Amino acid sequence: MDIFDFSDGREGYYGEYGGVFLPEILHATIEELLVCFRECKADPKFWQDYVALMQSYSGRPTPVTHLENLSRKLGGAQIYVKREDLNHTGSHKVNNVMGQGLLCQRLGKRKVIAETGAGQHGFATATMAARFGFDCKIYMGAVDVARQRPNVFWMENLGAEVVAVQDGQKTLKDAINEAMRDWVTNMADTHYILGTACGPHPFPEMVSWFQSIIGFEAREQMLAQTGRLPDRVYACVGGGSNAMGIFQAFFDDDNVELIGSEAGGQGVGSYMHAARLAYDDATVGVAQGFKTYFLQNEEGNMNETHSVAAGLDYIGVNPIFAHLHDKGKVRFEAATDIEVKEALRLTMRTEGLIPALESTHAFVTAIKEAPTMGKDEIILINQSGRGDKDIFTIADALDDAKWKTFINGKADQYRAENN
Amino acid sequence: MDIFDFSDGREGYYGEYGGVFLPEILHATIEELLVCFRECKADPKFWQDYVALMQSYSGRPTPVTHLENLSRKLGGAQIYVKREDLNHTGSHKVNNVMGQGLLCQRLGKRKVIAETGAGQHGFATATMAARFGFDCKIYMGAVDVARQRPNVFWMENLGAEVVAVQDGQKTLKDAINEAMRDWVTNMADTHYILGTACGPHPFPEMVSWFQSIIGFEAREQMLAQTGRLPDRVYACVGGGSNAMGIFQAFFDDDNVELIGSEAGGQGVGSYMHAARLAYDDATVGVAQGFKTYFLQNEEGNMNETHSVAAGLDYIGVNPIFAHLHDKGKVRFEAATDIEVKEALRLTMRTEGLIPALESTHAFVTAIKEAPTMGKDEIILINQSGRGDKDIFTIADALDDAKWKTFINGKADQYRAENN
Amino acid sequence: MALQSFLAERKKDKDLLVMAHVVCGYPSFEANMQELEIMAEAGVDLVELQFPFSEPSADGPLFVNANEQSLKAGTTVEDCFEFMRQASERFPFQLLMMGYYNTVFKMGEETFVKRLKAAGGVGYILPDLPVEESANLHRLSEEAGIEPIILMTPTSSDKRLAQLGAVSRGLVYVVARKGVTGSKTNMGDDVLALIERCRQHTDAQIGVGFGISGKEDMDFLRGSADMAIVGTAALKTWEESGADGLRKFFAELMA
Amino acid sequence: MALQSFLAERKKDKDLLVMAHVVCGYPSFEANMQELEIMAEAGVDLVELQFPFSEPSADGPLFVNANEQSLKAGTTVEDCFEFMRQASERFPFQLLMMGYYNTVFKMGEETFVKRLKAAGGVGYILPDLPVEESANLHRLSEEAGIEPIILMTPTSSDKRLAQLGAVSRGLVYVVARKGVTGSKTNMGDDVLALIERCRQHTDAQIGVGFGISGKEDMDFLRGSADMAIVGTAALKTWEESGADGLRKFFAELMA
Ligand SMILES: Cc1ncc(COP(=O)(O)O)c(C=O)c1O
Ligand SMILES: Cc1ncc(COP(=O)(O)O)c(C=O)c1O
């Protein structure tokens, strides 16, 4: 199954989803990008360079870790974890970013812009820009700037300019709008590094392509380590890039079930979540450059979303998943904030792993299902990132009293220094 | 040169340094440890298991990254970096810890204790304990507990008990004393996971052995990537474990110069530093179980030390280095706090790397020397850890105003929640 | 009257037509009505009524804020159509719907065309709907006698302009510069050259927009474009100095 | 008189000797002198004067604090020796230096032995100096007629005890339990068995320490050990109830 083998006149479409819905002014830029991307994709040397870069700079291949303790504790399937958390900058986001960096070089552009929500994509982009010598501007909702200061701190120290976006809900979707506004102005010398497998074609395909390195490694590693393919593969789904990254390698393996785990937030019926496919609240729409399921009202204006994991808190889902959901190829579940906190604790204590809150959504679903599976069955979870960068969020999520005391003390120290 | 090929009756001695200076009550425990360690070291299967564990759990081998931008900017030697920052838990400390975990299993002990200063070793130990299912207690000076709360937070969440030590200067050396007090009480079921290549024999040898994985990988990688050996290898030196880790592989390569970079703190003559070998302030003494150079007064009581990098801020240095310093085999330099801040900025902006403050000491010395070397010469730096875990320290070190505002806001939020 | 013939009619008396813009429901429909009165007085020929959308990614800060405030105040699509109906009955200028495609998509293209027609609108501008995605909507529009306004831009190649020209009818919206609505455009030879290039690919009237802010821009465009499109400058005037300011603004603009 | 013969002498009148402990300079040398007076009154046989060290890793919290405070107050090695000299002239009990090896190492082993001798000390306890590292110091001590106190512990194998016994002279310090100074030891059969095992490997007198806190411990040890070693319990009493308390403590202990 090659999902990217588009039929005539349907380039960029996955079933009825995808496409390019952008201002006319970007038409030439998107064309140029598409041509360049097609060249890169057709050029084996490009992929070799990409893999070499990821090896020497980001530590790929990331390993697959067998979680014997957790498997034993749950008493069902054997659980394996693909360790994207071990990447440089701490998440899978860097795969896409470094790939687009190489492509940007080929485009001959010297400036990059990006949107970021949780900040991991912005952090990765700022890192890439420092490494490639690009000018870098990161758009981030003002609410996210306030709550994700550590990532902002690093982005700025890496030399990026972080712009706090004051519009709308002041979160990820608004940052995307603002990045697009920059792009329609500065496309001549600027490449827009979109952070997930969303947005107009060719971004969903391109981001998925760079992220496919996850799955191709993982599939081989599972064969080497277990002698066979996993029965189920779990990944969290924000925009869908890490999930596409790991799932793609298994598209032709009909016995491998693929499960995407979305942000259930406060649960079904709460309208405080970001589950576009697992719950029934989303409908098809066109926004931010593409057609997919969005959490929107009946007139097409976007709803507020919520998740403890800022990186999953997005109104739309990648068009490929919208299609694969229709086709029943990928199953979608949701993990609530409460379940996420529990699974995080369990994973830390039994295995010494600290998955990012985003990644923990995949763990939740896997942990629910593993006990119902046979001991000879095998599960693979994509740990898309590490949680230690999210200490403020996790400390808040776990309501850690000592942490709060520490922060209060720190604040007192700063105030004293000022006097 | 096999530094561990002790002459008769001098087991555990490197020149006049090293030895075992412990209460009699620990004699049997140390003997047991030594016997077990000798078995492990003689057993190729043990090393294979260790390497396999490090590959699947910690992402080894870590890559070597060529810093083309920095090399170009400095205009001298080509700079390569061994990326221990990409390890699980974010530093080389995990190499030693996982190795000792395996050894502890073989010893049949179910409890581990460790001291920690910066918290990276405690973090790694807590992680290992969660993974191996050991009970875990971490001793940490009360001052360090207060200033390294993020690491404490993770240790606790990983299931470890963190004990704030209230004695002495309430920093690393006091934590070591307290860990020893625990050990002399509970040695029957408890293994002491010492965090660096210091302490009584066989710790310096054992920690160096586990850390040698760094250098053996790096040497091979340099040969593969550059076709030859580096001219100089740089590492920061706290207790000396990461430096021993990378240097050992080059001990027989007489053309490779080895440079250890100590904490220069506020500089020569300030007495606010932790440079045991680079400056002239340290003298030979016996403390914390072994004989080496310590920063102490003439009556043998230890002086206060200082470094912006908590992990380098130790009174003693590993006995192997004391010896290699005498022999002129390793050259020691110091990097001051101010130089470290500058080098950190430079490295972030030119290469997108965020070395730990400790590791940045190695960068300082390399950055000083690279421009004086030929363009065809090659430098290898050991990046022992990543700095993003040290955000509080680095933000303070860089005096970041926005960070302070953020912390104040966070504190206000917590206070408001409490009302 | 259909847009094409209406514009042709208007062009008889004037060398440069004017299209103005309001964001429906911002600051309120009453204010909108007042604005339209002023525009009508000044002799504006065409007005785009922007239906607010939550993700106005082709707009600049002023319009972004207007979209947001309007939605916050509870503006619905039905409100916008009803306002259009009232305005179309009351004023001599014609009305276009301006907005983002999702508004259309969610109600269905057929419904959209019917409702627009029923409200007295003569066309629409959907900046995020490229021609590749427009075939069905264009067909429905043609059947209903409604015009899609095609945008031509400084980045469009000749090949692209030909493609755009082929489906253009009534009015083409020439985007004077890169970027979003709102900032000033330096009118210069490149704008004239762009208009020239566009003319080679369409017979429709040519309106020029993005950053038109006063009389000098009008003078500059006269003889070259058929219509000047004024957006942000008018809203800014309204926000800063209300009805009187706006009256003065249009008086000066169209003097 | 050398330690060995002194102890033999004392043993003639008593079935269980007592060794006490002070940390030099804590809370002050004056206080130390007062403590010694009380000990002398009570008939204590031997006192270890702990020379404070910055890293007292074999000590429990009370002594750790005492070491720390004493150093903070500026106590020097010279002060300690001078105090020992005065005490040795004044009291009937004999004095040992107790401390960590670095104190010895820094002044040099030869100097240490000379100074200790000159101050009237008869031996020393260096808990972090294993016998493997002691050859030179033992030789110098023997030449000077000074005794190293060897520690035997519950974790020592018979082989190890033999090794320790071989170099023991005068007094062996049997550590009653694992751990640091300070906490209570439950005196039981294992302690008796340990003493028995130790006796098989040494002819020296056997002192038992770690956690001895009162009369019951004395009664327990009587007939088995030669000497009870009292450390923390006395310091604790001093801290809690001063000179009077300490007087009472020793009166009860040695009743
Ligand atoms: C660690 C991590 N995992 C997952 C996601 C979700 O994005 P995606 O669905 O594109 O993988 C994010 C987004 O920020 C992330 O940071
Ligand atoms: C990242 C890092 N590097 C270096 C050190 C110094 O230790 P060592 O000299 O044993 O490598 C530490 C100690 O905490 C550390 O955390």
Image (cartoon, coloured by chain):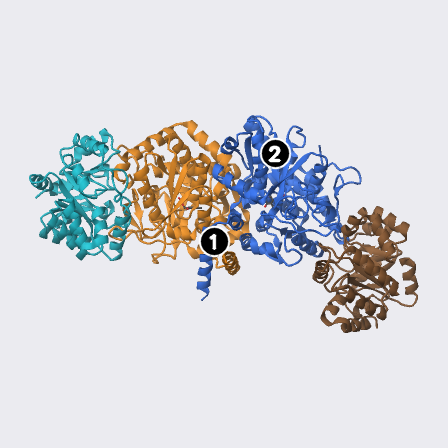
Chain colours: A orange, B blue, C cyan, D brown
Question: In terms of image quadrants, where is residue B169?
Answer: bottom right
Question: In terms of image quadrants, where is residue B269?
Answer: top right
Question: In terms of image quadrants, where is residue D178?
Answer: bottom right
* Left or right: where A171 falls relative to B411: left
Chain letter of mark 1 equals B
Label 1 crowding class (10 Å Cα cut-off): few <14, some 14-19, many 20+? some
Indicate which label's residue lies in the foreground, 1 or 2: 1
Numbered label tally: 2
Chain letter of mark 2 equals B
- Disc on res. B404: 1
The image shows residue B21 at horizontal and vertical percentages of: 75, 49
The image shows residue B251 at horizontal and vertical percentages of: 67, 32
Look at mark 2 in the image and give the residue it sits on: B233
The image shows residue C55 at horizontal and vertical percentages of: 29, 48
Mark 1 and mark 2 lie on one chain; the one further toward the N terminus is: 2
The image shows residue A57 at horizontal and vertical percentages of: 50, 36
Quadrant holding the N terminus of chain C: top left
- Disc on res. A135: none
Residue that appears at 25% across and 34% down: C154
Q: Does dot 2 land on a helix, a strand or a loop?
A: strand
Q: Does dot 1 land on a helix, a strand or a loop?
A: helix
Quadrant where ligand 1 appears = top left
Q: Is residue A72 visible?
A: no
- In this view, the residue in front, B143 or D212, is B143
